[in-house]
Image (cartoon, grey):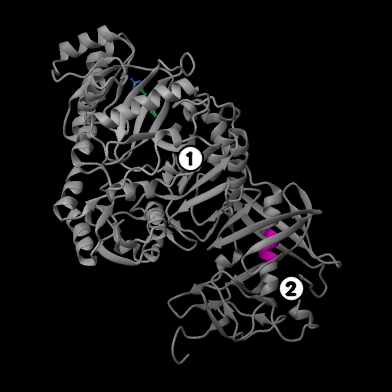
Amino acid sequence: MFRKILIANRGEIACRVMRTARRLGAATVAVYSEADAGAMHVAAADEAVLIGPAEARESYLVIDNVIEAARKTGAEAVHPGYGFLSENAEFAEAVAAAGLTFIGPPPDAIRTMGEKAAAKALMERAGVPVVPGYHGADQDEVLLAGAADQIGYPVLIKAVAGGGGKGMRQVAEAGKFANALKGARREAAAAFGEDKVLIEKFLERPRHIEIQVFADGHGNVVHLFERDCSIQRRHQKVLEEAPAPGMSPQMRRAMGKAAVAAARAIGYLGAGTVEFIADVSHGLSEDAFYFMEMNTRLQVEHPVTEMITGQDLVEWQLRVAAGEPLPIDQDALVIDGHAIEARVYSENPQKRFLPSIGQLHRLRQPPEGPHLRIDTGVREGDEVTQHYDPMIAKLIVWDRDREAALRRLLNGLERYEIAGVVTNVDFLSAVAAHPAFAAGDLETGFIDKHKDDLLPAPGQTPDQVLAVACLDVLLRRQGHAAPGDPYSPWARVDGWRLNDQGHDELHFLDGERPIEVTVHYPADGGFRLALPEGEIRANGELDAGGTLSADLDGLRLSAAVVHDGDVLTILTGGRGHRIERVDPMALAEVDLEDEGRVTAPLPGKVVQVMVAAGAEVKKGDALLILEAMKMEHTIAAPRDGVVADIPFAAGQQVEEGAELVVFAAEDGDG
Ligand code: MV4
């Protein structure tokens, strides 16, 4: 085994590889970009080397920098993870040339599998089923059109150098072939600098089923069964599971045998995945699956295989790379139970799944155990940047059977609390809860087919959620009540007023919908909230971690409300809701240039002071309430800081422009 390995990657996979390396007694070296200096994978490593600026092209993708980092730290082997340099044959060669071990297959295997037509020809010779079609070198247009006629329409034109669906064109009839060919070539040339294509029979209802294979340097090749990755969106996998629903033992044997033959045919070493496409137009059948491509790396979804086999695939990778034989043989491998993985992403399903960038103000995940695993590379407080893949975590569940695993998945997703970025958690829940998913009715077109069920138009925020937001705002305000005479009516934060019924108003924006909530303070405690749909009696407690235990008309629930400027993210019932606090304090002329002076926006009367001199406040904390023009304005802290002085007491009149709260100077002698 290696003494020290370098992980040429970041995020969850770097952390994942380090976990196993450490367990096996190997020291770990991280590489990181300037943007990742504080990242989890750097903290998790024994040593870390800066390899360049944030831009991956100038850091994680620079072969020389990675090799120099390995040389400098005395690492003996390099694990490439997935993505970045993991399927770059030149990198594998450069690692070997530097006298280090590449934890992956031989460069030639990587190269061959990157060429679709060559890979397909090789598989055909090895007796692996391939989609009927043409993958010859002659690219004459008339010849290609003739091949399409022979195959029979509909056909699919694929770029030979392709991947991720680029340079792919579906053609329904002969009359449309010439145009589609032009389009596919143009796209392929732009994306890969090469316009060669192959023609295949178009399969109308494909399922993506892949086989995990492993080969050692002693002539052993095994497979670790299949994963179904049909739930994809624009070639991005969303949910993956093992075993594949509806797979017969005969089909599993046939596919496993084909995958092992594929690995042998290219002289494989280490972990690989052979992707098949199964045509389910007539159900899952052992004579309707075809080789698609081979991925020459450890895949994102490898944990589902680990969960059903009880094996650690990274351990296998390290052992095989170190020259050891595979830990166990084919007959000793058995499937135990069912596992499903969901990829939790920082992205906005309502905005075409565009990545959502920002700070993870709150990140709480379900507790791990034998039935639930989380692979992540970020922590609460970390940033999701535009530089890298915005995956937050992989949630992996396991149970005796699919139905039980699915229940655990839904439960796990419901326990996610994420604020600061928009995520796909609700979307994942919708997919997992869909009857067609429960029925195992999988196909690559699943999300498109059911999109109306999976992406409902955002509705109004329910009153109950608004009540949680109000309760949080009100309890936080109480938490900042002025110390001093507890019996003074001016210290009360219950809206008590001389000659008044005692009420407040809270203002929000729910999308475009303005919301005004009147808050009453019943004598027996709590709050009475007049919400858009009616009244709710609310009471509760806020703990130090920001968790709110609420009682809404007798219904007890737990929630968290995360404040980010004016945006409130209310996390409750397994969902996140965003509303905006419209604070009439926006009227306050807050002069940040002048050390954060807080001045009265209008002439009025101070009705309540919530902080005292010396109080440490956070940006957005309520400081005092000013009544002006018959409205109450909550004046909030414009920044974090220490209150030096509050020149006015409750009940006093103030003039427009009067300084209401004086902050201590930022540092030093103030
Ligand atoms: C196909 C196909 C239908 N018929 N080939 C998509 C990416 C590339 N690796 C191969 N892909 C497909 N090839 C034939 N002959 C449908 C797809 C396909 C797909 C395959 C696997 C997973 C998701 C997919 C989504 C759309 C299309």
Query: What is the quadrant of residue 653 in the picture?
Result: bottom right
Query: Toward the viewer: 155 or 80?
Result: 80
**Disc 1/disc 2 C-alpha distance (Å):** 59 Å
**Total numbered badges shown on the rendered structure:** 2
Q: Mark 1 vs mark 2: which is more N-terminal? A: 1
Query: Toward the viewer: 543 or 115?
Result: 115
Q: Mark 2 and mark 1 in contact (Cβ < 8 Å)?
A: no
- Element marked by disc 1: helix
Task: Tell me the kind of residue under disc 2.
Answer: Val
Which x, y percent locates residue 318?
A: 33, 50
Q: Which residue: 30% across, 27% down? A: 261
Residue of label 2:
493
From this view, report whether residue 410 is shown above or below residue 661: above
User: Of all residues shown, which one is farthest toward the right?
Assistant: 524
Query: Toward the viewer: 483 or 516?
Result: 483
Residue of label 1:
309
Query: Toward the viewer: 346 or 19?
Result: 19
Position of 304 compared to 292: left or right?
right
Position of 550 compared to 59: left or right?
right
Q: Is residue 313 visible?
A: yes
Task: Answer few, some or many: residues within 10 Å of disc 2's Cα (few below 14, many 20 plus, some between 14 and 19).
Answer: many
Q: Which quadrant is the N terminus positioned in?
A: bottom left
- Element marked by disc 2: loop
Query: What is the quadrant of residue 129 in the picture?
Result: top left
Q: Which residue range is magenta in the image?
A: 470-474
Q: Which residue: 22% across, 56% down? A: 58
Q: Quadrant of ligand 1?
A: top left
Which x, y percent locates residue 246?
A: 52, 24
Position of 591 compared to 259: left or right?
right
Task: Tell me the kind of residue under disc 1.
Answer: Thr
Which x, y percent locates residue 152?
A: 31, 8
Q: Which residue: 35% across, 30% down? A: 275
